[in-house]
Amino acid sequence: MEKKHRLLAVDDDIDFLKALKKLLTKFEFDVEVAIDPFKAVEQIKNNSYDCILLDMKMPGLDGIQLMDKIMEEDPLVPVIFISGQSNIPLAVHAMKKGAYDFIEKPIEPERLIMMLKHAIERNAWSKERDMLLTAIDEKYQMIGESPVMKEVFKKIKIFSTADAKVLITGETGTGKELVANILHYNSPRAGKPFIKINCAAIPNELLESELFGHVKGAFTGAVETKKGKFHLAQDGTLFLDEIGDMDIYLQAKLLKILDTGEFSMLGDNKTYKANCRIISATNQNLEELIAEKKFREDLYHRLNVLHIHIPPLRERREDIPHIARFLLSKATDQYNKKILDFSDTAIELLKQFDWPGNVRQLKNVVEKLVIFSSGPIIEEKQIENIFNEPLFLK
Ligand SMILES: Nc1ncnc2c1ncn2[C@@H]1O[C@H](COP(=O)(O)OP(=O)(O)OP(=O)(O)O)[C@@H](O)[C@H]1O
């Protein structure tokens, strides 16, 4: 059985409270009442409610003062004011101060029930979103103290809420996918899907159906209808990784979708709205590809509304100690090891190296060091050993 929503109604009119409780109980709400605003504050301190209904005017403490106290205890709980006709300007003022809504007496039951449902739904969503963002924050941390990375962080902050297309460029392993995730999870689309497709990893014949989906019988082997990434990313973000590797025919198709805002599944004429934010990334030089006629210039301008470039690690060596220590602490947690730090000379060695594979390569080295170390400090020699391995990328 679904959990009943718990309400607190505060009013100095006992008869009104009784009638309200009877009405709301009929609609499966669990209703508690308070006639004394000071007692109500105690109840709010000791309980958790899904919504609070407040009379505008009560002896001792008025509704707005009471709302201020409620917000100190539980800033997220929605408050709905019950107001007489003469108090409407006051109710409007309460909404400006953070009340969810107000309803006038005499109460229309259906309106009140709808209002309560919406308030509770919105509250549940904002709590869920806060939890989601805390978890995401931990998962998608990006470290950097250098001036260039501070500029990148500034852009990420502004672009998160902009809802325009973003092109992320940078060498392999610099954190392009990480940035795409951070942009999505800090955007209003955070509760909707983040869908990634790697245009370099999928053969072009398959990429088309992966992107747009196909209906049964669309081509040999299409034994059933399958939704594509554009469908799956509906209302969320579609991350087109390695966009520079998309073939020219598919580039034209993608451009058309971006122009019309609509797409169709393979083997079907029906059109669907492409309501997703597009973030793309590449480690290739798109201007060079355009000059070689391998990438469409019009598509480039469409995708590159906002641009973030992440410089390679060797151009921001001051970030290396911070990132290495961050990765060390993550790896020690993961492998349950008690390694505290790198020695000073070990840090110097990490800073001197050019890191062609950037942060991904640094991460692999740190993980290896953690797995094979037993002492509390990682020494220079241990790093030299890894650098001297025959297949190590230099
Ligand atoms: N500044 C950073 N701080 C912490 N971790 C980072 C940072 N930059 C990258 N990483 C981590 O390094 C790894 C590689 O990053 P990511 O996959 O985002 O790179 P990429 O640029 O998309 O690579 P590729 O071009 O090869 O797809 C990931 O585990 C990512 O979390």
Image (cartoon, rainbow, N blue to C red):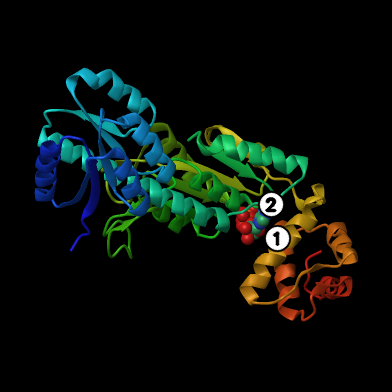
Which quarter shows the C terminus?
bottom right
Q: What numbered label is drawn on residue 64?
A: none
Q: Which of 311 and 247 is in front in this view?
A: 311
Label 2 C-beta lies within 8 Å of the nearest ligand 1 atom: yes
Which residue occupies 39% across, 55% down? 209
Single out the residue that lies furthest toward the front.
60
User: Amino acid under label 1?
Assistant: Phe
In the figure, is residue 335 to the left or right of 385? Answer: left
* Residue that extends furthest to the right in the rendered view of this protein: 345
Could you tell me which residue is drawn at 28 percent across and 18 percent down?
89
Label 2 is placed on what type of residue? Ile
Residue 381 placement, left or right of 79: right
At mark 1, the secondary structure is: helix
**Which residue is tagged 2?**
143
* Image disc number at residue 326: 1
Dividing the picture into quadrants, the one containing residue 328 is: bottom right
Q: In this view, does 352 lie above or below 159?
A: below
In the image, taking residue 347 as reference, residue 337 lies left or right, namely: left
| Tag 1–tag 2 contact (CB < 8 Å) | yes
- In the rendered image of this protein, does residue 206 appear above or below residue 287? below
**Residue 270, image x, y percentages:** 26, 43
Q: Where is residue 276 in the image (x, y as percent from the top left)?
A: 41, 42
